[in-house]
Amino acid sequence: MSPLLLSLHPGTALHDDQGLLTVRHRWGRTPLGPHTPPLAEALHTLAAGPTAVDEMADRINARAESCGLPPEPQLALFHHCLDRLGHTLQRHATHGSRPLATAVPLAPDAALRPGPVPDTPLTLDRAAHLRPVDGQLALESPRSRFRVRVEDPRTATPLALLARPASRAELGRHCHELPEGALTALLTLLHSTGFLHPANDAGRADTADLPSGWSFHELLAYDGARAGPRDRLYGPVFPLRDTEPPPPPVTRPATGRTIPLRRPDLDRAAREDRTFTDVLESRASRRTYGERPLTRDQLGKLLYRAARVRTVLAARPEDDRPYAVTSRPYPSAGSAYELELYAAVHRCQGLDRGLYHYDPLGHALTALPGTPGAVDDLLREASAATGAAPPPDVHLTLVSRIKRLSWKYAAHSYALTLKNTGVLLQTLSLVATAMGLSGCAVGGGDSETPVRAFGLAAHTEIPVGAFLLGSAAADGPDHATPPASTRRR
């Protein structure tokens, strides 16, 4: 008898339309065409719960004979239907009447690995991981199109042993509670769904290793951030619409002393700015700063040109926009504009050293409580991330109000906020170049440092990037905006 039992995924329905059988499932519908009573009964049995294929074959033979039909064509038709329905068939490893583990297909192209379990040491895929799903422990991997539900605690022992290459004999010695047939069923399930790999003579399982250049968390994040044919919500499906109101398009200004910033004359900037090509071609990361500090007006001009709120647009439910949005100088997924700018000022003419939050609607800074040590901590991280460069005049931290995105998007909000971060960092960099300032985007750092410094709410306001800003060094290529006659062409 086959070590695996089969069942149709819950929610799969069989429909008989004038003798033509159609199966409706998570991925749509699969027409099976004309059918006979033995085939229909077999499929209804699979929909009712786990059944052995050999037992199904015996039933089909008996039912075909009672109907006066040759059994061989009925069996062939049954196996053809199993092939057509592979993406909605669950596989079960059992011990007697007790389920050990169940493999659930996660995609319409989910296909079992062919062939028997190799008679060599085996090990788990290096991207495999266990997590609770709907009250059960589940084994998953971004490299498998299946989720394996752990139905029995006895399954934990072989999973633990398979963290390194283990032979069948070694597994048998340590898995006393699982008889040989049950262990074989479990290994067959794990191998056929891509979670087990054979080790070579040197004890390595090259096929189990992560793809070259990938870390586990990056592979998992990439898999979760792509649409893909997976059994999860994805895209602008507004998963929180029915449970909570949308976060506001612009966060309330922080409580504290407000420092208004001068609004620059954009018409004048348009006349005096370097050409876009010149700015783009001369943009570079500048990690040295001038003797004279950045000024408050320069900081305000950069923030206004790069990150202010230009307009606020009301919600339009009739256009499938059930939340208010804003327009700003840089693009943002779904016009969510979830990014906030926090400043740690080291030296800036017209501003005290300290911590600030930028209000993009009122174009003002709000002074935040904090110790000088908080500014020092951020500056130390900036220095470490830029090769021990001198501290910038101003350290800008980009913070994501992640729920502003996750209220609308499912599965990939974090990926979207990282893309938005890159867009804003580029905008800040280009504006700094156009203004003749030194600027440098920072790609790393300890996320806890800005959380402590600015008093951010964990997992609600998440640091996602930083930008270092200062006056340009006198010998730097961007220490001032060149006159029109000397601009590069």
Image (cartoon, grey):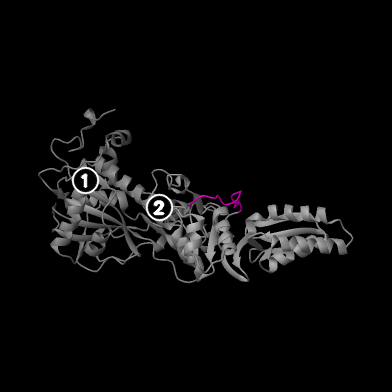
Question: In the rendering, which numbered label is found on residue 261?
Answer: none
| Left or right: 180 in relation to 416 | right
- Residue 484 or 432: which is nearer the viewer? 432
Q: Position of residue 86 (x, y in %)?
A: 65, 55
Residue 182 versus residue 43: which sits nearer the camera?
Answer: 182
Crowd tier of the residue under label 1, counting other residues whose Cα lies within 10 Å: few below 14, some 14–19, many 20 or above: many
In the image, what residue type sits under mark 1?
A: Thr
* Left or right: 70, with 59 as reference point: right
Report the quarter where the C terminus lies. Answer: top left
| Label number found at residue 386 | 1
Q: Is residue 54 left or right of residue 225?
A: right
Q: Position of residue 246 (x, y in %)?
A: 43, 66
Q: Secondary structure at mark 1?
A: loop
* Foreground label between 1 and 2: 2
Q: Which residues are magenta?
A: 108-121
Residue 325, image x and y in percent? 42, 59
Decide which of 409, 141 is in the foreground and name it. Answer: 141
Which residue is found at the position 77% from the left and 52% from the top?
A: 76
Q: Amino acid at mark 2?
A: Phe
Please tell me which of labels 1 and 2 falls first in the chain: 2
Residue 112 painted magenta: yes
Q: Which residue is mark 2?
A: 216
Quadrant in which the N terminus appears: bottom right
Q: Is residue 40 visible to us here?
A: no
> Is residue 144 part of the magenta span, yes or no?
no
